[in-house]
Amino acid sequence: MILSLTRIPIKVLVMSQDIVVISIGGSILIPDQNDSVYIGKLAEMLKKASEKVRICVVCGGGKIARYYTVTGRELGGSEYELDLLGIGCTRLNAGLLALALGDKSSTDIPLDVKTAAEKFKDGGIVVMGGTEPGHTTDAVATMLATELGAKRVINATSVDAVYSDDPRKNPDAVRYDKLTIEELDALVYKDHGAGKSSVFDPLGVQIAKKERIDIQMVDGRNLAELEKAILGQPFSGTYISSQ
Ligand code: UTP
């Protein structure tokens, strides 16, 4: 059973070489209004934060991916083909963020987590998108964290925390400040479908559980809270512990 908990600020012990993988939703990265302004501010914050922790970012596809998967489905595309279209969109979004990061990153976007981990050794901020059909970029973030030995994945999304139900549809939805990975597991969808969204990718939850990776859910539009989460400071959102 999931209990509603009062706000308990959680401070993470940040080591100088602490590695953080950020999964950023495409709808956050491309809000559809003043996109370059948001991406520019995000890039500045990431550059500043990267002086304290090492950062990798996995970008989602958002509205653009949804357009391609919906249109492709109407044209008779298979789930595999639709996933490939979605992956293409995530990589385009990654290219925009990498561009905004200037010499701190590279617009030569790695196509898989092994290549991303290799690039990570050169320093700077590694930005990537999706890898292969069958999951979303949340799962890629946990795979990259596993590859790098990172113990935290931050999910920058369009909701400010994990809720028991969609808070936009259900005013009685309970907001969680803290969850265990098992409790998150009970809340996520189990089946993958191209363009289908869940609070966190179910495969990503399984990987986080197995590899003991904590997940921090934060509103990605709120750059001050996102920065706090990255730096391991108390933040407004949900801390999902895998320990
Ligand atoms: P996203 O990661 O953006 O999925 O990838 P999403 O469900 O829209 O996630 P949020 O809402 O931004 O967090 C877009 C689509 O691209 C395909 C999937 O079809 C996914 O729904 N994709 C992405 C893959 O097949 N493999 C990947 O590694 C990444």
Image (tube, helix red, strand yellow):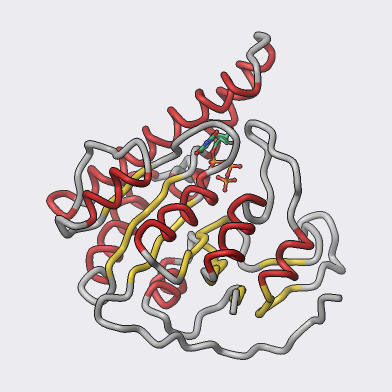
Q: Quadrant of residue 176?
A: bottom right
Reply above or below: 170 against 66. Answer: below
**Residue at 33 percent of width and 69 percent of height:** 19
**In this image, 174 relative to 139: left or right?**
right
**Frontmost residue, 75 versus 153:** 153
Reply above or below: 184 against 133. Answer: below
Q: Position of residue 229 (x, y in %)?
A: 45, 75
Reply above or below: 10 against 34. Answer: below
Q: Position of residue 21 (x, y in %)?
A: 40, 61
**In this image, 164 relative to 237: left or right?**
right
Residue lying furthest top:
75
**Residue at 62 percent of width and 50 percent of height:** 203
**Residue at 26 percent of width and 76 percent of height:** 17
Ligand 1 is located in which of the four quadrants? top right
**Frontmost residue, 226 versus 58:** 58
**In this image, 66 relative to 102: left or right?**
right
How many badges with numbers are in the image?
0
Q: Position of residue 159 (x, y in %)?
A: 62, 60
**Frontmost residue, 70 versus 168:** 70
Picture quarter with the N terminus: bottom right
Q: Position of residue 130 (x, y in %)?
A: 45, 38
Q: Quadrant of residue 121?
A: bottom left
Picture quarter with the C terminus: bottom right
Q: Quadrant of residue 172?
A: bottom right
**Residue at 56 percent of width and 89 percent of height:** 9
**In this image, 118 relative to 13: left or right?**
left
